[in-house]
Amino acid sequence: VIFTKKIRKGLERINKQFDLPGGLLSGGTHIDLQSNTRAIIDGRCTVFHYSTDEIKINTGTGLVVFSGKNLTIKNLCKDSICICGVIKQLEFV
């Protein structure tokens, strides 16, 4: 979804007013970590690199690198990715 500058500013104001995660309404990426065994990435993103010890996700604004053991992509949808395994490190590049 493409938002005009005016709409994006309005959505950012709503995000702040209701204390929602950054970019949730305006098409940004949201990462939900469940302990160190699962990460759910919501928003438009693509898999840049995939192996059992490292997964790189391109969010459009940068790369998010998950490092660990036995990493797998359990769910890959248009607007969501679920990564499972032992997540030891999360890096924003």
Image (spheres, rainbow, N blue to C red):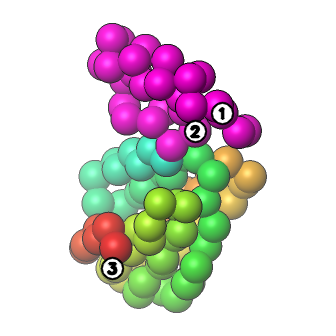
Structural crowding at the residue carrying mark 3, measured as other residues with C-alpha within 10 Å and reported as few (<14), some (14–19) or many (≥20):
some
Label 2 residue SS:
loop
Quadrant location of residue 46? bottom right
| Viewer-nearest residue: 80 or 2 | 2
Vertical order, 32 against 10 (above or below) = below
**Residue range corresponding to the magenta coloring:** 1-28
| Viewer-nearest residue: 81 or 92 | 92
Quadrant location of residue 6? top right
Asked if the residue at tag 2 contacts the one at tag 1, i.e. Cβ–Cβ closer than 8 Å, the answer is yes
Q: Amino acid at mark 3?
A: Gly
Q: Position of residue 87 (x, y in %)?
A: 32, 69
Mark in the foreground, 3 or 2: 2
Quadrant of the frame with the N terminus = top right
Q: Amino acid at mark 1?
A: Phe
Mark in the foreground, 3 or 1: 1
Mark sitting earlier along the chain (3/2): 2
Residue 76 is marked as none
Residue 7 in sight: yes
Task: Compute the Cα span from label 3 to label 1.
Answer: 36 Å
Q: Residue furthest top?
A: 17
Task: Compute the Cα span from label 3 to label 2.
Answer: 28 Å
Q: Amino acid at mark 2?
A: Gly
Label 1 residue SS:
loop
Q: Position of residue 23 (x, y in %)?
A: 45, 36
Mark 1 = which residue?
A: 3
Mark 3 = which residue?
A: 68
Mark 2 = which residue?
A: 27
Vertical order, 46 against 10 (above or below) = below
Structural crowding at the residue carrying mark 2, measured as other residues with C-alpha within 10 Å and reported as few (<14), some (14–19) or many (≥20):
some
